[in-house]
Amino acid sequence: MSAATRSRPAAAPPVTAGRWDDARFEAERARVLAGWRTGAEVDLAEAAALHKRRPALANVPRKRAWGRETGTVLIQPYGGVTTLAGHTELVRHLAEVGEADIVPTTVDSQTRNLKYASAEEALRASERQGKELLNGFPIVNHGVRGARQVVEAVEVPVELRIGTVVPQLACEIAFAAGMSSVTAGPIYYTAHYSRDTGFAETIANWQYVFRLIGRYAELGVPIGLQIHGIGTSTPFPNTLLGAAAVLETLIAAAQGARSFAVDARLMGNLAQDIAGVRAIREIVEEYVVRRFGYADAAITIDRKSWGGKYPEDTARAFGIVCYNAVSGVLAGADEFIANSVQEGVGIPLKEANADTLKAIRQVVGVMRGQRAALAGEEVETEVEHMKAEMRAILDAALDLGQGDPALATVRGFQAGLLDIPFAASRHCRGEVMVARDAAGAVRYLDPGRVPVPAAVLARHRACLERRAAARGRPIDYQTIVDDIFSISRGFLVRD
Amino acid sequence: MSAATRSRPAAAPPVTAGRWDDARFEAERARVLAGWRTGAEVDLAEAAALHKRRPALANVPRKRAWGRETGTVLIQPYGGVTTLAGHTELVRHLAEVGEADIVPTTVDSQTRNLKYASAEEALRASERQGKELLNGFPIVNHGVRGARQVVEAVEVPVELRIGTVVPQLACEIAFAAGMSSVTAGPIYYTAHYSRDTGFAETIANWQYVFRLIGRYAELGVPIGLQIHGIGTSTPFPNTLLGAAAVLETLIAAAQGARSFAVDARLMGNLAQDIAGVRAIREIVEEYVVRRFGYADAAITIDRKSWGGKYPEDTARAFGIVCYNAVSGVLAGADEFIANSVQEGVGIPLKEANADTLKAIRQVVGVMRGQRAALAGEEVETEVEHMKAEMRAILDAALDLGQGDPALATVRGFQAGLLDIPFAASRHCRGEVMVARDAAGAVRYLDPGRVPVPAAVLARHRACLERRAAARGRPIDYQTIVDDIFSISRGFLVRD
Amino acid sequence: MSTPAPSASKGTVVTGVIGDDVHVIGIRIMEYALRRSGFAVVSLGPLASQKEFVEAAIETAADALFVSSLNGHAELHLPGLRGACVEAGIGDILIYAGGQLTIRQPEWSGVERRFTQGMGLDRVYPPGTSPDVPIRDLAADIAARRRRAGAAAEASE
Amino acid sequence: MSTPAPSASKGTVVTGVIGDDVHVIGIRIMEYALRRSGFAVVSLGPLASQKEFVEAAIETAADALFVSSLNGHAELHLPGLRGACVEAGIGDILIYAGGQLTIRQPEWSGVERRFTQGMGLDRVYPPGTSPDVPIRDLAADIAARRRRAGAAAEASE
Ligand code: B12
Ligand code: B12
């Protein structure tokens, strides 16, 4: 190391959504692939050839495009276990018995935190004891060769599911193994999967992945992203998710990614949840396609089920799962990401996981063609208000970020324009407070510094006041806690 | 027997809804109670006293009234097994684990056909072998003393469920045992539970039960009816159900019954199913309360789940059950009559039956207060058309029957103004043919002689033509068959 | 009772739902499929007794009885049917049963054995049977019998 | 890290989610309930290491550690915590754990034994525990210790 380099410590590159140049990417890549012995198995050209040999619909972006064209609602479960045998068996069961359209490979949390050595230990112990000791599939330890066996075990495409601020090596291995999509991105994972890491750092780490996807695209291999925005696991307005999703999508698109499945989360009030899917779709298209000009971006909306606490009772969980399916179909969602009916119990057995898919499939089947059947003023008002709110947040944040979505993200969170309750990260202010109104719709109790338009906020406040009046008690912190547990107890509101 | 009586064979009494006089009732009663040895256990005054000792909400009509007042949706499963021990255990499980609001006592089909001796044999064999050999609870064989143990096993009220054209003795025993409601009535049970018995005969048999209910009412004990109209187990228009339900309700009210829970059946198209509940409620109230002046009639609408073939797969059945729950809540149904998730398998295990209730409870809980959330033009049009159609059928039938609902029933079916496909009875013409449109809504392929208003029929035909055009094949008998199986295969229409 | 078709048909089948059972939808679909395949159908409908089956079979010189049962009481109503046919002199008529022959669904091979070997039925079908399967079997069974009858006739000539 | 409340409090608790776990909602609700019941809370948040727990406990003279774990990795991250406390000279600090301590849900009594007798924790709670239960236990445990400490002090006077 030269004296010059030593004396001038490599300044953190400025926060920008600008496309990485090749030098930066290659330098970073060498470092990433050296992170664990299996990094050496990665060979981009060979991987691209592998992807091309697979059937067209074994690719996630193509499968999603096909679903959207044919009006086929896709269904994807969660799932990942420790051993290669166990995980292969799991994805095969989900594909064959559960008829999953896309199968998951959920990664364990040691891997998410780069603890490859401890993951290795737990993996060996699992193999010895015939037990699955990790909470997911340690893909880096299994390496390209292991992960390929997973991909080749099924005819359907595989999506890597990994909540982390350091996704680089896992994505390298996954894509090289033939997996063709990954859950993302920097905002969600900073907020919920780390405590100290800043947005700028996570953005850079994920930009690496997005650029890698860009590389694959240049080689003719589409790789998809499932964009989380800033969903959270307690009641919250889907507008916050939508605004953050636009920023994540823009950051990814700048590096060359083009296939985006954007989340919209079930909160429980049907009208609001239908509006959520519609409003998020319209805003993402408005900003990504029209304002920022990514005319070739493929955008689908997936309906995630309730992401908070579930009942331990499997039968009751079927109720949630199917209710979610109805709301998703009515909203015109393109895909379901399906928590299993054992969500409240623990890592699901493969049978319960497949059963969940069958129940959803039944609902989706029965409702095919009924999308437009129901609407109403309440939905329309909600859509309009949600869009107005997302625009207000995005425009304020982009303003602060001088039009750069990466900078807008960092500064937006600093300023509290973007915020979320109950985040793990200390970089979220957590000033936003949310409660349900009498019909269970999610409303701002306190918007913190989020620039919610006055008319929207007035409606939210009025809704909450009606609930307070009806039950004769103010909405307070205990209400927030009650609203976190309510779905797992069998209702949205019970005053 | 005097020569006079012998020479003039007792002419069948004229068909009329008129209230039975006491002499007729008492004479008939002696005959009924002599039908099996347990008839001797019945004592009206003592039974009335027993009913009055029970808590108020252990009475079905009061429970239904309470549900309607408090906006609490009630849930009732199906269920009945052979032995007293087995059935008591079943209702207890349904009440305690399944939290059923009303528990059922479904009667076996030997009893429904007055085969008490064979039922007795099967009952004894069941007790010996520790198996449940009948398809329901042989209540006449268990007698008042046995049935009382069932009633006293739970805090919730018990409804007798018995599809039969000869309900008299079973109802005597049930009411004397403290059960406070029975499924009815003459139209449904003639059409689907007998082959040769005419409407006039069944009406008389059920009038006996309705008069018995009138007697209990005079003693201060309300006993309820669940009115089936003429629902059937293949796709059919709920308007036919609604028109027949009005007639059944009027026939029952004339003898003194006052608590009516009227069915509306899931067919699968959400807009149409929501409209069905609303339209049936409005028409029943219009005719029973306003036109016929039963101002004190209590009317609730229960949403029956899909009544046709179910999938054998329990997970998929959860999908149907929960979808039904969503549609019922959106429609504002007061009660769910819940086929279990093992409907497609066989008589359900009590655990699966209770699980079904829990799933429904979860959906109902989450949707509480969301009733009015969704509507739309499609629903409104459907409601208006359904009401117009029911009025047309009812007015034509009542015309033929000179304003008497009993006579209207008999003549209406003769003339084919009232009709249904796939009936068991040869007294249904079966000229009506029904198919689903592209969105799964049920439409007349051929109305037979049912006086469907021209505008309604034109809309139905247009809908079917759109389906035919879309798939490039006409709607034929094979389509009707496909539509019978479709829900059990996971969809409403798949062309 | 619908009139049997001309004898040009592939065979005549008496259909019905036995005993105290009213589940008529399945057998109606079966009847439709039988007719479409060229069989003559004599339909008894629901709640049909053994006696009605036997009498209709004699009256129409039927080749087969199609007995449906769904309500779980098949084991109460089917035993004795073969014997009644034998007594009435049509002991070798084909008897098929289908629907849902038991309460719940015990292992099928055991059920099948109980109804064929145990009660002398020729064939029984599990729930969800599509009409083509029994129709194919029936055509084959009738053809085999006619061949055998033909052979017997020739032999005796 | 929030500052501990004045010593007038019922006791001081260090809270956090251990190891590679980010499930923070439950412990936040726990913290809120602890504060409302008069305890001082020192909150480490998610992804907290054993070292952070021990250092915070020493720094604030805490009475108890409330260790949360939901993601199924408690058995990877909890062993050794009691030892680390002993080594740091706070061996008798109360250690409670809660959340979802295992992958799936094996029989609870076995889990409880593994974490208490096996790893030296004082109390562990199954999923779905309402905050009042551990808070009641904590008040009792602290009171008992203070009584014992008082008695010991008196005895040594
Ligand atoms: C519709 C229905 C009814 C309707 C029947 C209407 C009618 N007129 O047909 C009504 C509401 C009247 C009814 C009443 C009762 N039912 Co019911 N009913 C059903 C249901 C939901 C669907 C049956 C159906 O229509 N299937 C569709 C047809 C097309 O299929 P299929 O009948 O299987 O027929 C096909 C094949 O099996 C085959 N096939 C049929 N017969 C034959 C015969 C031969 C020879 C061959 C080769 C082939 C063949 O061909 C058909 C075409 O592919 C079933 C549950 C299910 N399966 O989903 C319960 C079910 C059959 N019913 C049942 C019971 C118990 C009853 C009742 C006693 C009430 C009660 N306790 O719930 C009463 C009985 C009344 C009586 N006296 O019999 C039980 C039977 C229990 C068991 N076997 O373990 C079931 C399984 C429900 C349950 N899970 O409890 N029922
Ligand atoms: C929300 C959630 C998440 C959120 C967390 C958001 C956040 N920032 O907190 C997100 C999406 C980030 C997440 C991620 C993951 N999750 Co998660 N998650 C859940 C979920 C749905 C609800 C948890 C929750 O919020 N509960 C509500 C709170 C209020 O309840 P609670 O935590 O139990 O706390 C109460 C009590 O237990 C008690 N308590 C809690 N801690 C303590 C401590 C003490 C000392 C005491 C006395 C009491 C106490 O007090 C609280 C108040 O009453 C559960 C499933 C479920 N239970 O429904 C899965 C679940 C916990 N997650 C799971 C897993 C595996 C993961 C992932 C690995 C991804 C994956 N494979 O799916 C990652 C892990 C990431 C990581 N590094 O840890 C599994 C754990 C498996 C297991 N134990 O068998 C579960 C059970 C889901 C499942 N069925 O697979 N998850």
Image (cartoon, coloured by chain):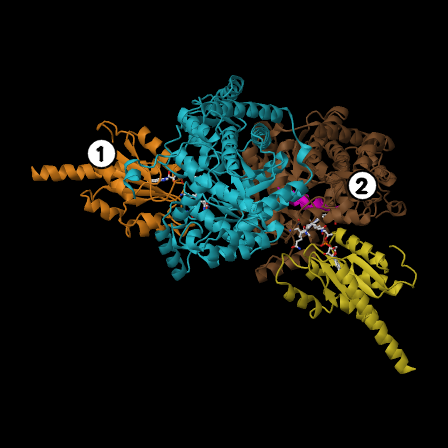
Chain colours: A brown, B cyan, C orange, D yellow
Q: Residue at x 84, y 37 (%)?
A: A450
Q: Chain of mark 1?
A: C
- Rendering coords of residue A72 (x, y %): 57, 32
Question: In which quadrant of the rendered image does the N terminus of chain B lie?
Answer: top left
Give the number of the disc on residue B487.
none
Q: Which residue, given by chain and number where applicable, does mark 1 sit on?
A: C60
The nearer-to-camera label among 2 and 1 is: 2
Between B416 and C86, the residue placed more toward the observer is: B416
- Rendering coords of residue A363 (x, y %): 56, 37
- Rendering coords of residue B17 (x, y %): 47, 33
Please give the count of numbered marks on the rendered protein. 2
Q: Does residue A7 appear in the picture of this structure?
A: yes
Q: Which residues are magenta?
A: A159-173
- Regarding ligand 1, which quadrant of the image does it lie in? top left
Q: Please state if C93 lies on the left or on the right of B469 as rendered.
A: left
Vertical relation: A349 (above or below) A26? below
Vertical relation: B115 (above or below) A418? below
Q: Is residue A163 magenta?
A: yes
Question: Pointer 2: residues within 10 angstroms few (<14), some, or many (20+)?
Answer: few
Q: Please state if C78 lies on the left or on the right of C61 as rendered.
A: right
Amino acid carrying label 1: it is: Thr
Amino acid carrying label 2: it is: Ala
Question: Pointer 1: residues within 10 angstroms few (<14), some, or many (20+)?
Answer: some
Q: Is residue A365 magenta?
A: no
Q: Which residue, given by chain and number where applicable, does mark 2 sit on?
A: A469
Q: Does residue C130 appear in the picture of this structure?
A: no
Q: Chain of mark 2?
A: A
Between D86 and A258, the residue placed more toward the observer is: D86
| Marks 2 and 1 belong to one chain | no
